[in-house]
Amino acid sequence: MLAVAFVEVIPESVRLSGESALLFVLVGYFLVHLFEHTLAPHFHFGEETHFEEMSHQHARTSVLVGLTIHTFFDGVAIAAGFLVSTWLGAVMFFAVFLHKLPEGFTVASVVLASGQGKRNAILAAGLLGGATVAGVALTTSLQGQLKYALPLSGGVTLYVAATDLLPEVNREPNWRMALLVFVGVVSLLIMQHLFHV
């Protein structure tokens, strides 16, 4: 996700809107930071979830609201990417898809740990899917605002990758996870060189 933000989304945002796009990248980054540390203090966009606190209704709600907002911006990022080019849309879709499975497990674990049943876990996962679709629909309907949507989603992508996903990789005791990150970045660069028009 970090490579997608730096190699694809941010440069494309600057190409579309000039240097003013960088301000919207910063706004996207810090809006998520503000949300994560004030409105939903029990929630972290990465996999760092405090399950011992999840029995409390407030913590469960914070996680669900946080993930719903995050998945909404995933939809914004995917749609904004496809509005720019099929290549960028496909890259954004792939990057989002790779972290959706851990998010699904996170939300299911949180709901189940709070004493809710499997039905509520499935409904919560459905809410996340619906939020992604809503982000796609809103961005598609506001095509004229692409110059704002793309850099905002770039800032969100940058935040999630840099502050939540990479620290999780760094906590892994072996070198395999770090190697996978490196392979992912190199793969993106190779695909960009071969297929990006």
Image (spheres, rainbow, N blue to C red):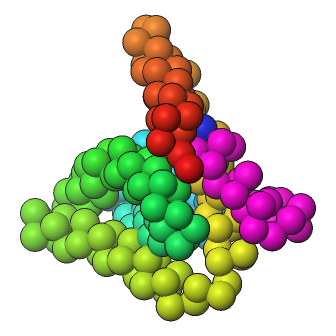
Query: Residue 62: x, y in percent?
Result: 47, 67
Q: Is residue 84 visible?
A: yes
**Residue 9 in the image: above or below residue 124:** above
Residue ID at (62%, 64%): 153
All told, the count of numbered labels is 0
Residue ID at (23%, 56%): 108
Of residue 69 and residue 120, the one placed in the foreground of this image is: 69
Relative side of 145 to 110, left or right: right
Quick one: which residue is furthest to the front in this view? 197
Residue ID at (79%, 60%): 14
**Residue 72 in the image: above or below residue 184:** below
Q: What stretch is highlighted in magenta?
A: 4-26
Query: Residue 76: x, y in percent?
Result: 52, 72
Of residue 73 and residue 126, the one placed in the foreground of this image is: 73
Relative side of 23 to 93, left or right: right
Residue 24, magenta (yes or no): yes
Quick one: which residue is furthest to the bottom in this view? 141
Q: In which image quadrant can residue 26 be found? A: bottom right
**Residue 194 in the image: above or below residue 115:** above
Q: Is residue 76 visible?
A: no
Relative side of 73 to 37, left or right: left
Query: Residue 65: x, y in percent?
Result: 45, 72
Quick one: which residue is furthest to the top in this view? 174
Query: Residue 46: x, y in percent?
Result: 48, 45
The main secondary structure of the magenta stretch is helix
Residue 62, magenta (yes or no): no
Of residue 123 and residue 58, the one placed in the foreground of this image is: 123
Of residue 27 and residue 167, the one placed in the foreground of this image is: 27
Residue ID at (40%, 12%): 176
Quick one: which residue is furthest to the right in this view? 19
